[in-house]
Image (spheres, coloured by chain):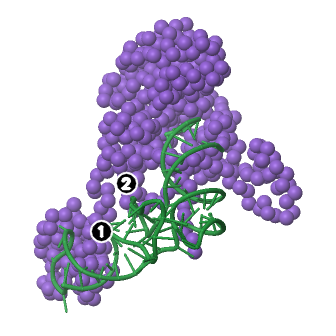
Chain colours: A purple, B green
Amino acid sequence: MAKPTLPQGTRDFGPETVRKRNYILNIIRSVFELYGFQPLETPAMENLETLMGKYGEEGDKLIFKILNNGLDNPAKQQQAREDFESVLAGKNTRGITERALKYDLTIPFARYVAINHQQLAFPFKRYQIQPVWRADRPQKGRYREFYQCDADVVGSGAYLNEIEFICIYHQVFTRLGIAGYALKMNSRKILAALAEQLGDVGRLTDISVAIDKLDKIGLEKVKVELSDKGLTDNQIETISRYLSIEGTNEEQLFQLEALLAGSGQGAEGIATLRLILQKISLIEPDAAIQIDLTLARGLNYYTGIIFEAKAPASVKIGSIGGGGRYDDLTGLFGVPGIPGAGISFGVDRIYDVMEELNLFPGAVNISTQALFFNLGEEESNAAFACMQQLREKGVRCELFHEPQKFDKQFKYAEKKNIPYIIIIGKEELDQRNCKLKDLRNGNQQTLSWSELSGFDFV
RNA sequence: GUGACUGUAGCUCAGUUGGUUAGAGCAUCAGAUUGUGGUUCUGAGGGUCGUGGGUUCGAGCCCCAUCAGUCACCCCA
């Protein structure tokens, strides 16, 4: 029989990996909770029409579609054939597929809010930690199934939300030990003002996509790309002046004011950035927040402030989180007028960064704290009784499954990274005590059974 | 969706211009060691060389196809 394999771009997660990932998730979750966010889960799959058209043309192609069941029903073969023809012609047909795996957590959340907005207390703050799927071709740091963890606030346009998101990023990365992360911030309003300045508001997306690549491909290639997209030399000149803005946050905003003079949107964007920077400098001065005018972000529902968190430059993995403000996400589902903002952490990438920088604490992989040696029938009865007392007190422990040579039992403890072993043999049984050994330093002591149950296993 | 590269033991990889019975390290198992592990030593098991076809007296090596993986582009976490 051929060896089974995994679907492309998916992974199994062994015990050690799950422990490490839970370590990350617990930190993120507890910070979300600290800021008053509530948990939400949505199904793995959504109706295809809920997702289509929400992520742009490229995004649509990357949605994992689920084939309908019952296509082989003889009674429906003719219809199935016709529907399939229309799929081949590039159209989606409900007859072939009407469900898809979720592509992110934001759109399903918007769908949830659109359905439940009468019952929700606004502003509604939710966090969500679930896998999402993309039919992308996998490569380094990109998978077809991966976890996202999002926190969003809807029903509030207050800038307090953006400020809190910056604090959340800062606290999470600090607790994880990822010093040297960078948090970039820009505003879609500024990009919109730039497009307005060029007299070509419709080109906002093209312009955004091109300038987003600046640090990757350089100014010259960005110009070429813009020219390919049909922008005039004059327009490109304005864009390169925009892109050449440098300096501290305040210096950049100052130059930007000159460039976008006369644009209401531009002024609004600049004022917001300035306000947020000023408040952050009072509340969380260590937050590594930087204005980055080249930041654009692909998702087209963002309308205000946008964020992107980058891994330390030494790890070539790029973005480990992002987010922003959207004025009208639920409007896509017929419920207009609910503004919101949200952020997302890319857990799998954060995992890779932590692994590369060796940031997981060693204790993450201590599962069982103590192993009782099994040295015979009566001995193990006593060991079992002691073990249950320890479990009562919350100590994670196990009894070796059968009487075996010391060698074997020691090696099991070692392999499982169990710090303590407890020996109750014939001698100990007679004296109603045990030997407790710390394998990390080799120290061994003799304890009575009652002393054992009070021992602090650290 | 486009392009490049790689598939040899559980893992990481050697394997000469095509030449007999395909190797090493790590890991596993057993023993040295019947109540004290990590080190060391000895031994053992484990491979249809991704799969299918072709060239050849002869293929792990060359050719074609196919599958899988990796990386890059597009896009994105």
Residue A251 locus on image (x, y percent): 38, 14
Chain under callout 2: A
Task: Tell if the residue under mark 2 belongs to the same chain as the one under mark 1.
Answer: yes
Dot 1 corresponds to which residue? A415
Chain letter, disc 1 residue = A
At x 59%, y 52%, the residue is A44
Q: Choose mark 2 or mark 1, whichever is in front.
A: 1
Structural crowding at the residue carrying mark 2, measured as other residues with C-alpha within 10 Å and reported as few (<14), some (14–19) or many (≥20): some
Q: Which one is in front, A40 or A15?
A: A15
Element at label 2? helix
Q: Quadrant of residue A19?
A: bottom left
Q: Earlier in the sequence, mark 2 or mark 1?
A: 2
Q: Which residue is mark 2?
A: A20
User: Where residue A331 sits: x, y (%)?
Assistant: 66, 32
Residue A406 visible to an observer of this rendering:
yes
> Is the C terminus of chain A in the top left, top right, bottom left or bottom right quadrant?
bottom left
The amino acid type found where label 1 is placed reads Lys
Image x and y of residue A123, in percent: 52, 34
At a point 82% along the width and 55% down the height, the residue shown is: A80
- Residue B9 figure quarter: bottom left
Query: Compared with residue A288, is residue A348 higher up or lower down, i.e. above or below?
Result: below
Rendered location of residue A298, percent (x, y): 56, 32
User: Relative to A379, is A76 above or below?
Assistant: above
User: Left of A427 or right of it: where is A339?
Assistant: right
Looking at this view, is A145 or B21 the one in front? B21
**Quadrant occupied by the N terminus of chain A:** bottom right
**Rendering quarter of residue A185:** top left
